[in-house]
Image (tube, rainbow, N blue to C red):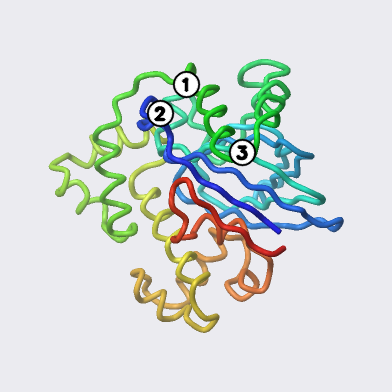
Amino acid sequence: MVAYLRFPPPPSLRDVVEHFWMVEGSGSAEVQRQILIPNGRPAFAVALAEPGFRHDPLSGARWRNEGSLFGIMTRPHVLSQSGPSSYVGAELKPWGVAALGRSDRLVDAVLPLDDWLGAGTTGRLAGGLRAVEFGASRADGLAAFLEPLVQVVRFELVERAVDLVEKYRGTWTVAELGRALVTPYSTLHRTFHGLTGVGPKQFSEIVRYFHFVGELLDGPADAAATLAALHGYYDQAHAARDFKRYTGVSASSFLAVQNGIAALMHERSVQDGEGVAGGG
């Protein structure tokens, strides 16, 4: 069984955090692997039970999934876990890494919490969160940890651009974004890249594919051609190439393996303060 909850941030963190989340699973003695699809958001996560691993299949890099800040991903990562799992984290705004005071944007990178804030930080945070029950109290505890780290950044233009990209699911061109925002391309690109680490075009590609995968998770296995057309792809071959780029596997392989994390990230029925549970 897997239990998942999501909570809104307090007012003090609404400009930095999209939502807090937590997940617990009974797990299996065998190693379970999940594909984490890029969604255009940085994240912060800490393990409250035995941590698994995070693996970048392109670079071969491997991190212990213990306590880390992640930048925006432009390619998939694979999560591996055996035995019971318990994690709590925050999905950040696209500019969240900058707002937490990092001069680098950590694109496709993982920064261990102890490397960022000092040895022992992960253990202290995990111990405090583990001491409160699964639910809103844990989200409050993580919010209290993050609040002192927040710095003021000017994100208004980027926020407006992100809202349009999400509204049109990444199908607008950068020229269309610039016209809608009444902003020259050079200004939009410089500001967007400066705060997020990726340009508006690349961000749109990530968002478009995140929604594409969400529809694939919801639909039948033979829906790929229709979905490709709906999401602006030139042909099914183009969609298939991008699918492997953003998930690391073919569409048929993705549907055939366990991808509970991807399904939870795309779960439309989850409302803040509510959750879902599933067999596993």
- Residue 47 lies in quadrant: top right
Label 1 secondary element: helix
Mark 1 highlights which residue? 147
Image disc number at residue 268: none
Q: Which residue is mark 3?
A: 88
* Residue at left offset 74%, top offset 46%: 85
Q: Is residue 227 left or right of residue 27?
A: left
Q: Is residue 150 left or right of residue 248?
A: left
For marks 3 and 1, give the CA distance. 16 Å
Horizontal and vertical percent position of residue 111: 62, 30
Total marks in image: 3
Query: Label 2 amino acid?
Result: Leu
Residue indicated by mark 2: 13
The x, y position of residue 233, in whole percent, is 37, 71
Few, some or many C-alpha atoms within 10 Å of disc 3 (few <14, some 14-19, many ≥20)? Answer: many
Q: Earlier along the polypeptide chain: callout 2 or callout 3?
A: 2
- Residue at the image position 20 percent from the left and 54 percent from the top: 176
